[in-house]
Amino acid sequence: MTISIDGLAVWLPGRGIAVGPLSFDIRGLTLLTGRSGTGASAVAGALGGALPAGALVRGSWTTKGVSIRYVGVSRLDLLLDLTVAEALGDAGPRAEQLWGSVTGLEDLGATLGDLDPATCAVLPALRGVLGSSVARDRGEPTLLVLDQPMTHLLPDLRVGLGRALRRCADGGVDICWVEHDLAVAVPQADHVVELLGGGDVVVLPAERWSPRTLPLPPEAALSRALGHPRAAWWDLEALGQHPAVSSAVPTVPPGAGRAHPALTTVPVPAVRAGVGHDLEVVVGETLGIVPGDGDRARALAVARRLAATLDAEPGPRPPLTWPAHVPLGRLARTWCGARGGDPAAALDRAARVAPVDHTRTLAQHSPGERRAVVWALSAASAQTEVLDQPEAGLDAEGRRLMATALRSENSATATVVVSHDPELLVRACHRLLVLPPADEGTEAQAVLGPPALVADHLPHPPALRRAGSRALRVRDVWKDAR
């Protein structure tokens, strides 16, 4: 069926008009995307009945008799003694097949405490898929609304979930999917709705869509530049067969590195670093830390040890908890008063990545906007700061701007980034530290070096490496292909 949305507009308390008015249809798997702050999450919240108290909605959509299921962007605080079957709400063959196809695991009787948090993060979306499929089997028209379900997932889980959503749509469930990971989402979508802001939208079949306000993912951008047909833009195997791709080599952007041989290095003993061997961290560099087995908690522990050593602190500092209900202007002044920096300049920096308002609280900003604020305040700090998944919730253009700033802007301190996003890591970081899987034992060595040398050791290499190229970035190939 087709769900027609006509003149939808959303007003949120403390924010004002968040989106609209806009009109479009949901048919099959419909992808909603756009720059952070254009209101895609507000649309999802309106459709799913998940807007905050006091929100006002105008417009209409045809949902009479439609079973609607909503999965939000935030991870659920799942009880660790729940089994996978209980978290999915189904213990039958369909749940077993879905769980296995997405995660590669089979035991529905395993408790969530036995799983890593990144795997647990996929459960709300899978529960939505199962519930929607069951409703559809009963003959009910069904709409599944997902708001950035991939934000906390590892790359392989993202691919598995994307394919599961495609199968769900093929089974007759209409899906409205808000997502910023275009490389995974666009190949699975039937239609793309790009929100341009101010109520303007572009609605096209996925096979004809090109972004107006966002950059294409590297594989699609390079395929287009090399003249490949649109249907092959997402085909890494076809891309790797082009001579310019297979022969390209990585380059370092001129003038883009903060780390320099003349800068100070700080030795970190193995017992202090917690990685099995001594390290040297360059003051002024952006250092990416990547867990080889997806264990983000372990990577964060290493990152905090390094930050404490660089700042000559006796022990790792505790994780930061950002106050959700303090206006950004006051938050920035308090932070910069304690850690250094100019609060107005920090908020201006955040606004270049995503729209922020100093009079609103963190809670009144979207997840991507909150990440932009945290990154900007950390960049203003005179201390060594740890950025935990700074890209989560940001659109593709915001991620690109953040990566460029992390790599190119001068700093008197190092910045330590913990992330699973290979494209951000190779663009933002001067060096990468890839931690070995914990099951390899204490004798396993971490791998440290520049992205060009370490990229193949990442648990999920960048797109061009997966296509078979030694290059990391589109311009590494394009400079030789022109």
Image: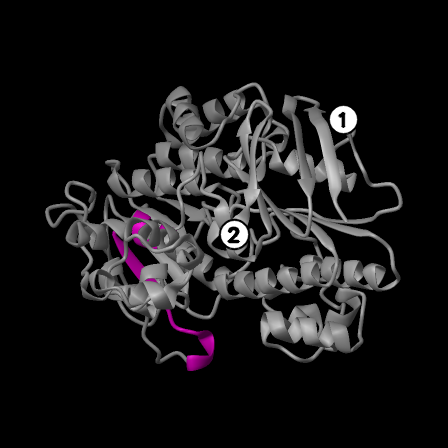
122, above or below 292, in the image = above
State whether residue 481 appears in this view.
yes
The label number, if any, that marks residue 59 in the structure image: 1
Q: In this figure, what is the number of numbered marks?
A: 2
Residue 168 position within the rendered picture, expressed as x and y whole percent measured from the top left: 69, 62
Q: Residue furthest left?
A: 262
The answer to whether one can see residue 318 in this image is: no
Q: Residue at x 28, y 41 (%)?
A: 413
In three-dimensional space, the C-alpha distance between marks 2 and 1, rounded to whole angstroms, equals: 27 Å
| Other residues around mark 2 within 10 Å, as few (<14) / some (14–19) / many (≥20) | many
Viewer-nearest residue: 213 or 341? 213
Looking at the image, residue 39 sits to the left or right of residue 409; the answer is: right
Which residue is disc 2 drawn over? 186
Q: Tell me the crowding category of disc 1: few under 14, some 14 to 19, or many 20 or more residues within 10 angstroms, Cα based.
A: some
Say if the magenta span includes residue 345. Answer: no
Q: Which residues, given as a range, are shown in magenta?
A: 424-440
Residue type, mark 1 in image: Gly
Image x and y of residue 332, in percent: 47, 26
